[in-house]
Amino acid sequence: MVDDRLAALPLTPRYCPGSELDTAQFHDLIRLRIEVFVVEQECPYAELDGLDLLPTTTHIWFADEAGPTGSLRVYADKKADGWRIGRVVTRKNARGQGLATQLMISTLGRFGQDDTALEAQSYLGDFYARFGYIQTGPEYTDEDGIPHLPMARPGQPSQHQP
């Protein structure tokens, strides 16, 4: 499923409930998402959606001296009776190092015993399939013109612990 060599990389994820993020952490995580999703992908949308600071949202990220290198958030999904993973992002100069894989391994280590769902950019469908996600509906194009796939993964014991 997932390359075990990547699971052994010496990365330490940071976990923080949204309600416990300090101002600098929140700023740095939002800045990364805006740099990638709004500027790089040219999708001018309101990044602040009210979910980031909820106590039921957990932010998971890696960082170096320049700030977050990759991050995602997980929040309670009332519709799916499980968790929703979103805003998976890697800083441009940190790509190609397996950070997204490490983020998913860390996330599933904490939340993978429950059902999880996500909306994958279509070209990343195979990436998420490596973690046991299956497409649950037809491909759709979001408001920014980017094709996405709804995907879900049933809860199961984690094979990799963070």
Image (cartoon, rainbow, N blue to C red):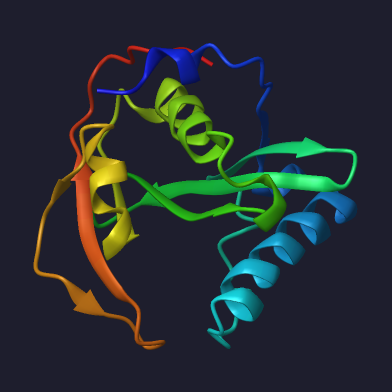
Q: Tell how many labels.
A: 0
Q: Residue at x 24, y 46 (%)?
A: 126
* Location of residue 118 in the rendering, given as x and y in whole percent from the top left corner: 32, 53
Q: Residue at x 28, y 32 (%)?
A: 131
Can you say whether 14 is above or below 71 in the image?
A: above
Can the viewer see residue 81 in this picture?
Answer: no
Q: Residue at x 50, y 40 (%)?
A: 100
Can you say whether 22 is above or below 109 in the image?
A: below
Q: Is residue 55 left or right of residue 158?
A: right
Q: Quadrant of the N terminus?
A: top left
Q: Quadrant of the C terminus?
A: top right
Can the viewer see residue 45 in this picture?
Answer: yes
Nearest the viewer among 149 and 47 is 149
* Location of residue 31 in the rendering, given as x and y in whole percent from the top left corner: 76, 65
* Location of residue 98 in the rendering, given as x and y in whole percent from the top left corner: 53, 34
Q: Residue at x 71, y 61 (%)?
A: 32
Quadrant in the rendering for residue 4:
top left
* Location of residue 113 in the rendering, given as x and y in whole percent from the top left corner: 30, 23
Can you say whether 54 is above or below 107 in the image?
A: below
